[in-house]
Image (spheres, rainbow, N blue to C red):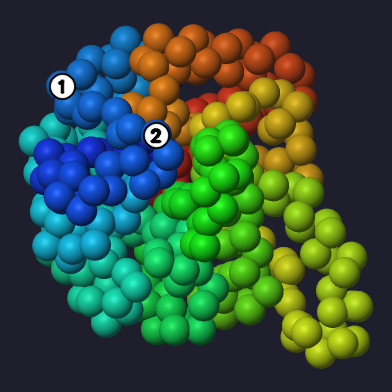
Amino acid sequence: MAQDVIDVHSHIITPEFLSALKGENRLMEEGFPLPAYDAERHLQWMDEAGIKTSVLTLAAPQPSSATTIREANEAAAQLKQRFPGRFLFCAALPLPDVDAAIREAVYALDTLGADGIKLATNVQGQYLGAPELDTLVAVLNERRAVIILHPHRPDPVNYEVMAQTPLAMQEYLSETTRAVTNMISRNVLARYPNVKVVVPHCGAYLPLAVPRMKSLTPVMQANKMVGDIDWEANLATLYYDLAGAHSPETIRIMLSITTPDHLLYGSDYPYVAPQVLTQGLARMKQYLTDEPDLAPFKEMFLWKNANQLFK
């Protein structure tokens, strides 16, 4: 198992992406600078940490140009081809233009060999779960696509609050929860059950939000604010990466809304220093060995679940 770990949460940051953001004066749109990315250094860290394969997705913020997104997807595809078995990638899409996003999804999956699709929680205020996105999800459902979610800056955003508490410290968790619950409330995931959706950062607030939503659903239905929600079908499509503040306690909380075969290792490289990630992975391996209730799932969390998801 030393070199079998699959990392489902890592980011590619291309020179073209950075140049496009700089030209639009958007480098600090998410409230912090984008880290440098180099594939060789990424591979060096993977080798040191014992990671066999990393799944690449484009970092936030969402580029305005479909050309920039195409360039990023092609760069990720080239890395996958250049280093067989070391990199997979989930392609970015040029939302909020749904028709353009469908064209890019088809091109990425059918021509570039993308292993899935990356979706931002929102693009210019168009949140996942919005009715106009159903046609895109239908296309992804036909292709049984893996979808990796990632939080982006909320829209609208309170800049004063953002300055006091950077997005990554709290709002990203709210943003992820907001997008997923929005999809659940419209039964998007139940209506398109062939997609598999990876929720980042230890499930954000979903272990708290899901029981609350369930308890309030009858009240909302009585007031004709929501319709029927197929909880079992919606939740069955959700997977969760362990990037961020993972711990035995966190995993146990996540298992209150999912099953052990839906948890996946994630690093968030290159947003966290490599030595910190290496130490975190070693700590995870240790508690997954020492905790009797979690030990049976060690290999599942570290690589078997991801291997099954991306087979």
Q: Are marks 1 and 2 in contact (CB under 8 Å)?
A: no
State whether residue 72 is above or below residue 292. below
Q: Position of residue 57 (x, y in %)?
A: 31, 46
Earlier along the polypeptide chain: callout 1 or callout 2? Answer: 2
Q: Position of residue 41 (x, y in %)?
A: 20, 19
Q: From mark 1 to mark 2, how far is it between C-alphas? A: 24 Å
Three-letter code for the amino acid on which mark 1 is drawn: Glu
Three-letter code for the amino acid on which mark 2 is drawn: Phe
Q: Position of residue 149 (x, y in %)?
A: 46, 53
Camera-side residue of 11 and 239: 11
Choose top left, top right, bottom left or bottom right for residue 4: top left
Camera-side residue of 156 and 272: 156
Q: Look at mark 2 in the image and give the residue it sits on.
A: 32
Q: Position of residue 131 (x, y in %)?
A: 51, 84
State whether residue 258 is above or below residue 70. above
State whether residue 206 is above or below residue 80. below
Judge whether residue 253 can be spotted in this image.
yes
State whether residue 45 is above or below residue 293. above
In the current view of this chain or complex, which residue is farthest to the front? 160
Residue under the point 45% across and 71% down: 126
Residue under the point 15% across and 21% down: 40
Camera-side residue of 162 and 302: 162
Nearest to viewer (mark 1 / mark 2): 2
Residue under the point 64% across and 19% down: 288
The secondary element bearing badge 1 is classed as helix
| 263 with respect to 92 (left or right) | right
Count of residue discs: 2
Q: Quadrant of the N terminus?
A: top left
Q: Look at mark 1 in the image and give the residue it sits on.
A: 40
The secondary element bearing badge 2 is classed as loop
| 252 with respect to 193 (left or right) | right
